[in-house]
Amino acid sequence: MAAVSPSVFLLLVNGQIESANLPEFDDLYCKYCFVYGHDWSPVSGLEEGISQITSKSRVTQQDLVWNFPIDITFKSTNPFGWPQVVVSVYGPDVFGNDVVRGYGAVHIPITPGRHKRTIPLFVPESTSRLQKFTSWFLGRRPEFTDPKVVAQGEGREVTRVRSQGFLTLSFNIVTKDLKKLGYDMTSEVLSVPEATYRP
């Protein structure tokens, strides 16, 4: 009896949002969500989550540490639209209002194994001094209505943003049946030999 070939492949992702380096801020929490293509669908795990509030150590001003777990499994028939994780960091302003302190996004690594990614964070900026003052005074800083826009290029070219620290994530990746469907994601295949690289 012939073996039945698989019709989908699986991507198992677990890991954590480890820490953030935002020297100017304290008492922050983060939210995450996944953005993926039309052929992808989650099989198990959580598509979005919100962490606990973390504070810097009073003795040594170090990174903000969450170690907040991420765990999700996707199935797909096509690698187009490979999943990305979008992270939004929030914290209080001088008036006690929760405002965005950074957005960032990164693609889930494509090779199996343990990976660590440090992503730059940014925040939207007001376009004029009057808007900047008004938003500060009212406690309504510019932010995206849907954080998933961070993972999409469309419409972002007109957005004014400012860099604001870094966030570190770690991933443990397992794939199933990618090779059986004709996709070879081993690191040897994906690496470019130095002799053929031309800047």
Image (spheres, helix red, strand yellow):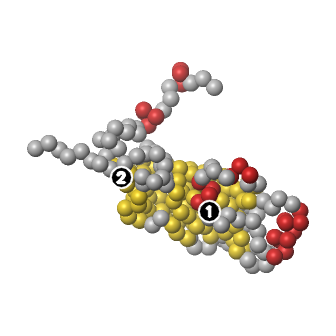
Q: Residue furthest top?
A: 195
Q: Mark 2 highlights which residue?
A: 10
**Residue 167 seen anywhere in this rendered image of the structure:** no
Q: Position of residue 196 (x, y in %)?
A: 53, 21
Q: Quadrant of residue 40?
A: bottom left
Q: Position of residue 8 (x, y in %)?
A: 32, 50
**Contact (Cβ within 8 Å) of mark 2 with mark 1:** no
The N terminus, quarter of image: top left
**Residue 86 seen anywhere in this rendered image of the structure:** yes
Q: Mark 1 highlights which residue?
A: 147
Left or right: 54 in relation to 190: right
- The residue nearer to you, when weighing 15 against 7, is 7
Marks 2 and 1, how far apart at CA: 26 Å
Vertical order, 39 against 71 (above or below)? above
Residue in the image at 60% along x and 67% along y: 30
Residue in the image at 38% along x and 64% along y: 44
Q: Amino acid at mark 1?
A: Pro
Q: Amino acid at mark 2?
A: Leu
